[in-house]
Amino acid sequence: MGSDEELYAQLTTLKLSDVTASNINTVTEPIHLQKTNEESLKTTVLLNQATFRLDGGPIPGTSVIETTTVTDDTRTVIFQPEAGSVYALNTAGALATNPSSANYTMYISNAPAGGSDLIAFFYDSSDDGTVFFTDDANWGPLYVDENTRLEGKVGGTVDAATWQLNLYRVR
């Protein structure tokens, strides 16, 4: 890699709306931070701006709804971004089957699965089948990158619970 022409050559078959973070990461990864690569670095910044990757807002077309169903009271990974990406949690909730004194806890963690490096940022107890994570859960914005993940635990009596998250990719 060495010139901005090479960067464009590798993206030339794509329309702006089709360019993903992975495309840009792939063509810019081998560029070193040095004076001789100044033009390629400027081109990289331009590509990121053109695909809305630098303003901190949601990248168009990246909203996802993640669902995870659990049937026991173990802490479960609900969402973990792929390498090189950052997501903002927009809203969260759960649908439960036959809840009785059910309690819901969401965590952000950087520990290996089952490890103890985590922070609980939401808790609710309810007998309702639909739980909206609002009120005390004024977490916004909560960002999750490849070094962290969202986990959840449902305690009490529940036949099954489906965690529901809406996230936007911001980087």
Image (cartoon, rainbow, N blue to C red):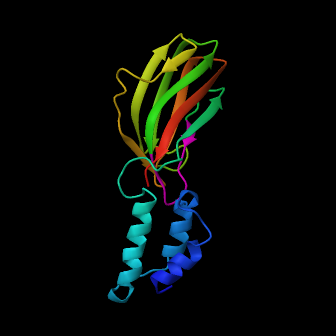
Residue furthest toward the bottom? Answer: 36
Q: Quadrant of residue 19?
A: bottom right
Between 110 and 171, the one lying in front of the other is 171
Does the rendering let one see residue 73? Answer: no
Between 34 and 46, the one lying in front of the other is 46
- What is the x, y in percent for residue 154? 55, 25
Between 40 and 86, the one lying in front of the other is 40
- What is the x, y in percent for residue 33? 36, 80
The residue sitting at 57% across, 29% down in the picture is: 163
Query: Vertically, is 151 above or below 157?
Result: below
- What is the x, y in percent for residue 22? 55, 63
The residue sitting at 37% across, 58% down in the picture is: 54
Does the rendering let one see residue 123? Answer: yes
Query: Vertically, is 46 above or below 31?
Result: above
Q: Quadrant of residue 128?
A: top right
The residue sitting at 62% across, 70% down in the picture is: 13
- What is the x, y in percent for residue 50? 43, 61
Residue 83 highlighted magenta (yes or no): yes
Quarter holding the C terminus? bottom left
Residue 138 highlighted magenta (yes or no): no
Query: Vertically, is 75 above or below 18?
Result: above
Residue stretch in magenta: 76-87
Between 121 and 11, the one lying in front of the other is 11
Answer with left or right where residue 159 lies relative to residue 61. Answer: right
How many numbered marks, from 0 up?
0
